[in-house]
Image (cartoon, rainbow, N blue to C red):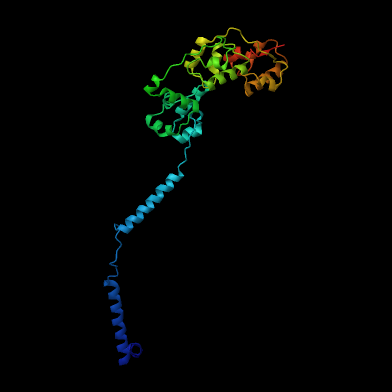
Amino acid sequence: MNFFKSHFWYHKSQRNGIFFLVICIIIVQSVIVFGDFSSEDTADLHATEVLAFHHQIDSLQAIEIENRKPKIYPFNPNYITDYKGEQLGMALDEIDRLLVFRKTNKFVNSNKEFQKVTKVSDSLLNKISPYFKFPDWVVRKKQSSNTSWKDSKQPHYKKKVASTTDINKATAEDFKTISGIGEAFSERIIKYRTKLQGFSFNNQLNEVWGLEKEITDKVLAVFKIIDKPIIKKTNVNTATFKELLKNPYIDYQLCKNIFEYRDEVAELQNISELKNIRDFPLDKYDRIVLYLVAE
């Protein structure tokens, strides 16, 4: 008994202190358990200031997305590459159709022709066509075809007559007598004729850059090859690489193939042996041999 009495017996002031401490603990626990600490000042997500802030953030995000988009500058659609076509949203088969068309040495000169060749959808054409930039002569041609009816009342001048019908002797002024042939085209025909040393085949006129078949037909209806040109031929067995490249129908790769074949056989006995060369363009054989001889 003395043991328990020594631990639980306190004098009056100690008992009052313990009782007060217990009361304080109960009060604190009650406040914690039953007290409401939530704030009445809740944020209104629909407040004008909040909505304005969100709108500003959305605007900045839209500007950032727009800035990240690749910029499109005016370009000639005839020279679209795989990478450029993919950027514009074209499918691979649409790009391939354009590349195959261009390999024929032809050009698209209007939005309608571009769609006809590539078969792109109307929506994609409307999206990318504002960036198309065709050569100046194409633009001038369209403008001349869209002249008003008042132009028809202008006085008509006497049609000029060509001084010759020989296409290899015709001057720039002679070619201008053909409807659709102006200063640029007439000079371009003469420049290409000089490069060829004269036209040997009528369809060589189709090789003039930018000249449409409709125009070449008009030219050939008036001008013919009366006297075939005398072309200076190059000996394929002794020609240098640079001399062989002067042939208007031989590019770098074909020139390289010819030299490799010449090294294999030592010497071509007949010019027709060119047909044995790997990847030789047989469709151009008759033109290539105009400038070559095997001696």
Instruction: Looking at the picture, tell me which residue is in the foreground, 29 or 54.
Output: 54
Number of numbered markers = 0
Instruction: Name the side, left or right, on which 67 lies relative to 168.
Output: left
| Residue 37 coordinates in the image, percent (x, y) | 29, 70
Quarter of the figure with residue 88: top left
Quarter of the figure with residue 202: top right
| Residue 48 coordinates in the image, percent (x, y) | 30, 57
State the quadrant of the N terminus. bottom left
Which residue appears farthest toward the front when viewing the image?
A: 155
Instruction: Name the side, left or right, on which 12 lies relative to 200.
Output: left
Q: Is residue 138 above or below residue 35?
A: above
Instruction: Looking at the picture, tell me which residue is in the foreground, 79 or 262.
Output: 79
Instruction: Looking at the picture, tell me which residue is in the foreground, 59 or 145.
Output: 145
| Residue 206 coordinates in the image, percent (x, y) | 53, 16
Q: Residue at x 32, y 83 (%)?
A: 21
Instruction: Looking at the picture, tell me which residue is in the foreground, 21 or 40.
Output: 40
State the quadrant of the C terminus. top right
Q: Is residue 259 above or below residue 293?
A: below
Report whether residue 54 is seen: yes
Q: Is residue 231 above or below residue 63?
A: above
Report whether residue 9 is seen: no
